[in-house]
C-alpha cells in the first residue's frame, strides 16, 4: 500500500500536519503582526513542529538506552561526523519560535495538543511501535497475532495520529478566544455586501 506523497519521500499525514501548523500559526497571528513577520514566524513554527516530532520519534525506538543515546547525540553539533542525530541542532530549531516571545501565550489549547501528541506516542510505543515501512525485529507486539499487512496499517495510523505533536508549536501563538471572536466579527462587519 502506498502511504506516501511526493515520490515516496513524505507521508500524507506529514504534509497535512506540517501544513496545518503553518496555516494555524498564520491564522493565530493574523492582524497582530505584518505579513512578512507572520510568514517567517509561521515557517519557524512549522520547522519547530517537524523537529519536535523527529526528536520524539527518534527517542521512541529504544527505552533501554535512551539516556546513553541522548549523551552521545548531545556531544556533536554537526550534521556530519559520528552522530546520525544532531540533537543540539534539532533542539535549537525546535526552540526557534521562542524568538517571537512577544506573541506567545501559554494556554490550555497548547497544553491539550501537546499532551495529546505525547500520549499518542506513549500509546504507540506501548503497542509495540509498529512501523508501516518495515516489520522491525522485536518491535511488533501484535506480530504473532496479525498478518503483516495489518501491522503495517496500525503502524501507519499510529504514525499519522502522533503527528498531532508537530502541530503543538502553532498553539503557542493561540490568542484568547475573545480576541478571535471580536476580531472575526469586526472583520465580517467591515466586508461590503455583494
Image (cartoon, rainbow, N blue to C red):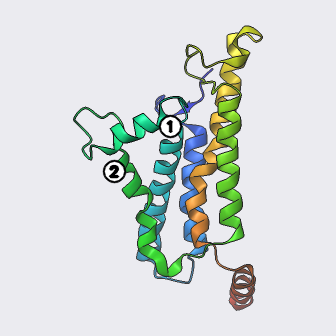
Label for residue 89?
Answer: 2
Q: Residue 139: horizontal and vertical position, in percent?
A: 61, 19
Does 152 sit left or right of 64 as displayed? right
Q: Quadrant of residue 137?
A: top right
Count the numbered circles shown: 2
Does 80 sit left or right of 65 as displayed? left
Name the residue rendered at 76%, 12% in the picture: 146
Quadrant occupied by the C terminus: bottom right
Residue 193 visible in the current orientation:
no
> Furthest residue to the left?
81
- Give the vertical position of 7 relative to 32 (above or below): above
Question: Along the line of sight, which residue is nearer the eye, 5 or 181?
Answer: 181
Q: Residue 121: horizontal and vertical position, in percent?
A: 64, 40
Label for residue 129?
Answer: none
Disc 1, SS? loop
Residue 140 visible in the current orientation:
yes
- Give the vertical position of 66 relative to 42 (above or below): above
Q: Residue 37: horizontal and vertical position, in percent?
A: 42, 76
Quadrant occupied by the N terminus: top right
Q: Earlier in the sequence, mark 1 or mark 2?
A: 1
Alpha carbon of mark 1 to alpha carbon of mark 2: how far? 15 Å
Name the residue rendered at 68%, 57% in the picture: 113
Q: Nearer the viewer, mark 1 or mark 2?
A: 1
- Give the vertical position of 191 relative to 20 (above or below): below
Crowd tier of the residue under label 2, counting other residues whose Cα lies within 10 Å: few below 14, some 14–19, many 20 or above: some
Question: Along the line of sight, which residue is nearer the eye, 161 or 79?
Answer: 79
Name the residue rendered at 45%, 70% in the picture: 98
Amino acid at each position: 500500500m502506498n502511504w506516501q506523497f511526493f515520490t515516496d519521500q513524505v507521508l500524507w499525514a506529514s504534509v497535512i500536519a506540517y501544513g496545518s501548523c503553518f496555516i494555524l500559526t498564520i491564522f493565530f497571528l493574523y492582524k497582530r503582526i505584518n505579513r512578512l513577520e507572520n510568514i517567517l514566524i509561521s515557517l519557524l513554527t512549522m520547522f519547530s513542529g517537524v523537529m519536535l516530532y523527529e526528536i520524539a520519534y527518534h527517542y521512541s525506538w529504544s527505552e533501554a538506552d535512551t539516556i546513553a543515546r541522548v549523551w552521545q547525540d548531545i556531544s556533536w553539533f554537526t550534521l556530519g561526523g559520528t552522530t546520525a542525530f544532531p540533537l543540539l541542532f534539532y533542539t535549537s530549531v525546535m526552540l526557534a519560535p521562542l524568538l517571537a516571545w512577544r506573541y506567545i501565550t501559554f494556554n490550555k489549547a497548547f497544553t491539550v495538543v501537546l499532551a495529546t501528541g505525547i500520549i499518542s506516542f506513549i500509546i504507540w510505543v506501548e503497542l509495540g511501535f509498529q512501523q508501516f515501512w518495515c516489520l522491525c525485529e522485536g518491535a511488533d507486539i501484535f506480530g504473532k497475532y496479525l498478518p503483516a499487512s495489518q501491522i503495517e496499517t496500525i503502524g501507519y495510523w499510529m504514525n499519522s495520529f502522533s503527528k498531532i505533536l508537530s502541530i503543538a508549536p502553532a498553539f503557542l501563538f493561540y490568542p484568547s478566544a475573545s480576541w478571535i471572536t471580536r476580531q472575526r466579527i469586526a472583520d465580517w462587519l467591515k466586508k461590503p455586501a455583494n
